[in-house]
Image (tube, rainbow, N blue to C red):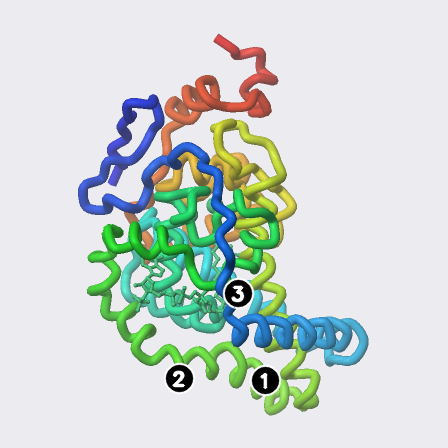
């Protein structure tokens, strides 16, 4: 289904799809975050400190001790759980940028549970707030509060009251009634430890005789912390460094290094400008966009369909109107 693109009073493009009102609103102007005292959540601070120490040890074992099968397995889990976030929580559930039949949804929810970034329904809720109230206090990882806050700090403190207040108005009706998402949320505290820690530790031990230590610290802790940090880099680095070919008035930027590790998420200036595009990037960037390849593969099977995208003309007009001049269009001398 083609999205219905409209233009608001400020000349900002947005998708006016009545069925999905909160999915793709254009970013409001940047607001300065206040400096209110933070309410630290010590449980999270301690757990994340432990996770990162364990992951450092796991990284050492990955390089110098684990069997090659364990390293390959950790890599496969990284890609699977990554897709559970990119193709699942992000492009399917938060943005509804394409539709999926139930077998693909089941694959994605399993992958998503391995990723342990909380129930996909909650992930999507935070992410819709991130787009709707981008770079204000109602954005969970408001990048105007600095690199550390947008990277991990936001998970170590209570959420801003503005977020909780404005969050009440968010439309989540489409996800609240999805049986697969409801099932994952209901049994999350049972399913997540099995998928993220127990299964990744047991498979190397029982299938190729890995030690418990190597299996746990490499395939569970190192792999989990690695993918968390890659995800968080989209919120921190890709909101700070890179070109802004589509909209120079916002912080989200085209960050190739992040996109390489984040399976194609990282072309963040494009994504915040055209959030409904299932590619989260312009066509030319597909080489670094494994998530798009994955969705296209399932589209061939008929399990993914109704992919939304943006026409070349709309992109071109937007580049000319609000871009920073770094788009390759300018290289063609096509400035009129
Ligand atoms: C993790 C998530 O790391 C990472 C997400 C990153 C997103 C990246 C996006 C980038 C683009 C995509 C790129 C993907 C790239 C992937 C690459 C892969 C290779 N709306 O939260 P609570 C209300 S998770 C509306 O407890 P506190 C609501 O009433 C890591 N309302 O707030 C709620 O009650 P309920 C593992 C909202 O108490 C109530 O507030 N997980 C919203 O301030 C309380 O909510 C963890 O570490 C909203 N958005 O606590 C857990 N939010 O839920 C981390 C809240 O009953 N989280 N409300 O409806 C926590 O411990 C807590 O949330 C907290 C805040 C301490 C941070
Ligand atoms: Zn963003
Ligand atoms: Zn998004």
User: What's the CA distance linking mark 2 and mark 1?
Assistant: 16 Å
Residue 178 or 299: which is nearer the viewer?
A: 178
Mark 1 crowdedness (10 Å alpha carbons): few <14, some 14-19, many ≥20: many
Q: Position of residue 279 (x, y in %)?
A: 44, 43
Q: Position of residue 110 (x, y in %)?
A: 41, 72
Q: Is mark 3 within 8 Å of ligand 1?
A: yes
Query: Mark 1 and 3 residues: CB-CB less than 8 Å, in contact?
Result: no
Q: Nearer the viewer, mark 3 or mark 2?
A: 3
For the point 49% across and 64% down, the residue is 39
User: What's the CA distance linking mark 1 and mark 3?
Assistant: 27 Å
Picture quarter containing residue 181?
Answer: bottom left
Picture quarter containing residue 13?
Answer: top left
Label 1 secondary element: helix
Seen in the picture, residue 87 relative to 201 is either above or below; the reply is above
Label ID, residue 201:
1
How many numbered markers are drawn? 3
Earlier-in-chain disc, 2 versus 1: 2
Q: Position of residue 327 (x, y in %)?
A: 56, 25
For the point 54% across and 73% down, the residue is 42
Earlier-in-chain disc, 3 versus 2: 3
Earlier-in-chain disc, 1 versus 3: 3
Residue 228 at least partly seen = yes
Label ID, residue 156:
3
User: What's the CA distance linking mark 3 and mark 2?
Assistant: 23 Å
Q: Quadrant of ligand 1?
A: bottom left
Whether residue 213 sits left or right of residue 253 in the image: it is right
For the point 52% across and 66% down, the residue is 40
Picture quarter containing residue 177?
Answer: bottom left
Mark 2 highlights which residue? Answer: 190
Mark 2 crowdedness (10 Å alpha carbons): few <14, some 14-19, many ≥20: few
């Amino acid at each position: 289904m083609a999205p219905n693109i409209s233009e608001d009073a400020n000349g900002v493009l947005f998708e006016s799809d009545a069925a999905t009102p909160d999915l793709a609103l254009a970013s409001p102007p940047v607001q300065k975050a206040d400096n209110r005292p933070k309410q630290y959540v010590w449980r999270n601070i301690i757990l994340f400190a432990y996770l990162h120490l364990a992951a450092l040890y796991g990284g050492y074992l990955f390089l110098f001790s684990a069997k090659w099968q364990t390293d390959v397995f950790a890599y496969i889990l990284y890609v699977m759980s990554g897709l559970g976030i990119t193709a699942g929580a992000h492009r399917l559930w938060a943005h509804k940028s394409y539709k999926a039949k139930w077998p693909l949804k089941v694959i994605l929810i399993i992958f998503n549970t391995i990723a342990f970034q909380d129930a996909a329904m909650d992930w999507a809720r935070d992410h819709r707030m991130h787009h709707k109230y981008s770079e204000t206090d109602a954005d969970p990882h408001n990048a105007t509060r600095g690199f550390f806050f947008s990277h991990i700090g936001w998970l170590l403190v209570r959420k801003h009251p503005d977020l909780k207040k404005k969050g009440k108005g968010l439309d989540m009706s489409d996800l609240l009634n999805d049986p697969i998402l409801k099932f994952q949320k209901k049994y999350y505290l049972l399913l997540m430890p099995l998928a993220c820690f127990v299964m990744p530790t047991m498979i190397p031990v029982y299938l190729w005789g890995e030690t418990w230590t190597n299996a746990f610290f490499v395939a569970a802790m190192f792999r989990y912390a690695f993918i968390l940090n890659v995800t968080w880099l989209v919120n921190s680095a890709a909101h700070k460094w890179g070109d802004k070919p589509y909209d120079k008035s916002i912080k989200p930027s085209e960050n190739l290094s992040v996109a390489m590790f984040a399976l194609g998420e990282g072309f963040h200036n494009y994504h915040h400008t055209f959030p409904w595009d299932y590619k989260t990037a312009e066509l030319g960037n597909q080489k670094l966009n494994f998530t798009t390849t994955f969705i296209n593969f399932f589209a061939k099977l008929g399990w993914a369909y109704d992919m939304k995208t943006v026409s070349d003309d709309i992109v071109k007009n937007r580049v000319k109107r609000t871009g920073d001049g770094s788009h390759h269009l300018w290289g063609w001398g096509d400035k009129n």
